[in-house]
Image (cartoon, rainbow, N blue to C red):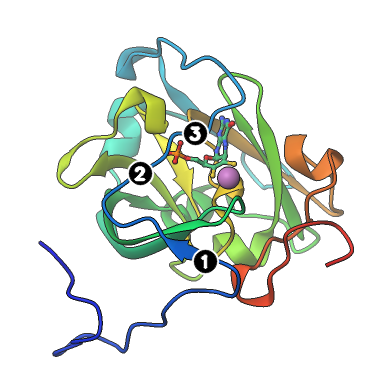
Amino acid sequence: MNITRGFTGRRAPDPGLPPGQYDAGDDWPVLSAEVTPDLAPADWTFRIDGLVEEARTWTWEQAHALPATAYEGAIHCVTGWSKFGTRFGGVSLDAFLEAVRPHASATHALARAHTGYTTNLPLADLTGGRAWIAWEYDGEPLAPEHGGPARLLVPHLYFWKSAKWIAGLTLLDHDEPGFWERNGYHARGNPWEEQRYSGD
Ligand SMILES: Nc1nc2c(c(=O)[nH]1)N[C@H]1C(S)=C(S)[C@@H](COP(=O)(O)O)O[C@H]1N2
Ligand SMILES: [Mo]
């Protein structure tokens, strides 16, 4: 399905481009610090640990038993491109977090990929139906170069927060910088406030 920009029909008004971004159109650039791993769904697991009542690891099948939900909308990369009308399928992070019962003291999460990539997020950005573990794009399995079999998807923040080949989250009572954040990028990365670099 194509979303015609400018004609919103029954849709919510298109929020448009965040400051300093351009529309990449049909392109979907690949940005990876690592070599794309050869990760089969059978070898994929997703774990939440740290400040939780009950740390838990889900297999591919166990994760797929959770209620399926979709995201349709834009993604925004800090290098400048935004892509509208993306369609991801997966499971809301709320469903995973409900199962582990985060401690009241948990304020942040450090996300890690099966390749070692990390990125930090406020826990509040991962709840409320705004973050997903995504394994489908346009109704097809998510391509390996885009993080398949499964990636974190947090589309309201710059896309470096959406860790590809997601392996898990550790809940913390403080913020701990991940890979790009240790290299000068912003702790939160809200594109609407142009939080690109630490200090922005
Ligand atoms: N594991 C991992 N996840 C990652 C990255 C990465 O290098 N490794 N790059 C991030 C950045 S900077 C962006 S813009 C998006 C790119 O996702 P894409 O290649 O599917 O466009 O993934 C994010 N997640
Ligand atoms: Mo990016």
Q: Is residue 30 left or right of residue 52?
A: left
Task: Where is residue 63? Give x, y as percent.
Answer: 35, 37
Marks 3 and 1 sit apart, C-alpha to C-alpha, by 16 Å
Q: Is residue 20 left or right of residue 17?
A: right
Task: Residue under label 2, please give it.
Answer: 28
Q: Nearer the viewer, mark 3 or mark 2?
A: 2
Q: Looking at the picture, does residue 107 appear above or below residue 96?
A: below
Task: Where is residue 175? Give x, y as percent.
Answer: 84, 52
Whether ligand 1 has any atom under 8 Å from the Cβ at mark 2 is answered as yes
Q: Residue at left 35%, top 44%?
A: 28
Mark 3 or 2, nearer chain start: 2
Whether ligand 1 has any atom under 8 Å from the Cβ at mark 3 is answered as yes
- Residue type at mark 2 is Trp
Which labelled disc corresponds to residue 156?
1
- Residue type at mark 1 is His
Q: Residue at left 30%, top 57%?
A: 25
Which labelled disc corresponds to residue 175?
none
- Residue type at mark 3 is Lys
Mark 3 or 1, nearer chain start: 1
Q: Residue at left 68%, top 76%?
A: 193
The residue tagged with tag 1: helix, strand or loop? loop
The residue tagged with tag 3: helix, strand or loop? loop
